[in-house]
Amino acid sequence: MGDKNSIKSKGKMEQRKNIALMKSLDKAKNRKKIPKSEYVTEMKNKDNILEIDNLATYFFTDSGVVKAVNGVSFDIPRGKTVAVVGESGCGKSITSMSIMRLIQGPSGQIVDGQIRYNSEEGPINLVNVPISKMQELRGNKISMIFQEPMTSLNPVFTVGDQIDEAIQLHNPKLTAKQIKTRSIEMLELVGIARPEGIYDAYPHELSGGMRQRVMIGMALSCEPELIIADEPTTALDVTIQAQILELLREIKDKVNASILLITHDLGVVAEMADYVVVMYAGRIIEKGTAIDIYKNPQHPYTIGLLNSKPAVGKVVDKLYSIPGQVPNPINMPSHCYFKDRCEKSFEPCGAIYFKLRIFANTFR
Amino acid sequence: MALYALIRAMPSNYVKQMTSGKPGVTDQLIEQLEKNYGLDSSIPEGYVKWAGNVIKGDFGTSFVYKQPVFKVINDKMWASFWLSFIALILELLIAIPLGIISATKQYSKTDYAITTFAFLGISLPSFFFAALLQKFFAMDLRIFPLQGMVTAREDYEGFRLLLDIGWHYCLPIIVFVVLGVGSLMRYTRTNMLEVLNSDFIRTARAKGLSEHKVIYKHAFRNTLIPIVTMVGGSLPGLFSGAIITEGIFAIDGLGYTALQALKFGDIPFLMGFNMFLAVLTLIGTLISDVLYAVVDPRVRLS
């Protein structure tokens, strides 16, 4: 009896500690004035637009702490496409939301790490930047395309209004007429026929593919340096997918932007990405250039992931799937998270999570 | 029909009410009177007769007021209407901002405080709260009059009269507002929370809009949709009056009149009154449908 009670009280203490941590983080985030010294940093490499270093984003829930992103580090070089792949719930979307600082507080908090952004006025750490500064960057220098085009546009405003709003916000000097011209230009750019007509349409009058094009147009309207595309093609059918990807690539080259592409579709990755980051259960398990990952995958999870992709010209009875499921994010084991599902698990896997091994300069 | 049967089936009728306790009334006279008021026929017969007249546009004459039913309704309606209308406006002005604040600061101390206040309002019985107000403001502090609509023996005219009525309306309006604000506020809060969790709000934030703009432009327009529907539907309530509150403050409105009519078995008035409410309900639904199209482009027909 006594033992049980002490475990219970220990759990309670831990929970209280977590809530206190959550509150202190939330408070720090919502301070009115944050001194500049807190968020000015140095880039490791001047050619990178974004460097994510040991990022940890947790959700403090009633049943425990969910470590959605746990020590993720990777770089996004200027003008390149970096793809983050992994199955559902591995933390890829949360990583992107962390960059945008769109994690829903107070339960979701960035607990640790740095997101260094190479802005025009010098490198800054997005984790500590005040929200007002963040609002200047969002939609302007860093913009995001979401995975649900059907619900991501506000149903009560016209498409034109919504694009205008973004342009006007970041270019306050433009006149209403100039803004409208620019919006129509954007709609044209993303391949919408009859842009003047669509400008006055409401989102419900458009198809999913059209809405996603509008979303992309909106995201690109201020010529961002970094485009975060969070599964931009998941909700669309295959023909539209190809068009959208083609569009993204074209636009990227046109404005020399970097793309952070979040997806679980390895076909998309092969087509688009320069670098690939493979995530599993909130951690990076393998990262390298796209060629390295495809030609010579090292981690058993990556191999499994590649095997579970249907290939043209190969007849199989049953598509390969990785056995088992992602472990419960609450109370993660301290050993390799993939151990229980791994075909190659051996004795040392039970030990503490090992460090990244460097296979090549660009490949870890 | 059912209504007519129910009213007719009440143990007493208007003639009996009128004649009871008066010694000089003979049975013959009662019979004669019942015939005059059309109370001698059977229930279906009476209903058919009444309905026949309604089709011809004749709602009959109120027994108690000796005037055509619609004239009575028209006379009494405005007192109730202004009372409820002002209260509704105040309710909206208070409830919607409070609902929004409480939704944007969900689970904060402000949210809990507002919610507590709202539930307090919802759970207070109107007669009890009205009596409390009367005790404090009318009896003890003597700021507001106890009841009635105008000050007796002061024949105010024009603007002074309006002021006087306004002064008398204060307490009943407070009762309405405090009792009504809670549910409206909770309704706003629920809707706002739902909207704030939607994807397009995330898009709005990702655009770089300030939190203020996100809430008051993008979220608010969407929260408005269900609220407008609800307010449109409350139109009949504006005219029908509130029986209890009007009774306590002796305000000569429709609610009070309807209660009197029920007491005396004033069949034509009650039937006309219910007809009136039915029509208002239809108009209310129509108005809310029209407003719905105004705030929500998805239901607009091109």
Image (cartoon, rainbow, N blue to C red):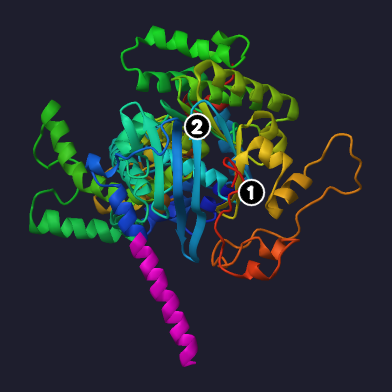
The image quarter in which residue B254 lies: top left
Q: Write down the region rendered in magenta.
A: A1-21
Mark 2 lies on a secondary structure that is strand
The front one of B275 and B279 is B279
Task: Decide if residue A1 is on the left or right side of residue A363.
Answer: left
The image quarter in which residue A37 lies: top left
Residue A76 x/y as whole percent? 50, 35
Mark 1 lies on a secondary structure that is loop
Label 2: how many residues lie within 10 Å, few (<14), some (14-19) or many (20+)?
many
Say which chain tag 2 marks: A
Q: Is residue B168 above or below residue B9?
A: above
The front one of A162 and A128 is A128
> In this figure, which residue is indicated by the disc labeled 1?
A88
The amino acid type found where label 2 is placed reads Pro
Task: Decide if residue A318 is on the left or right side of residue A6.
Answer: right
Residue A77, numbered label? 2
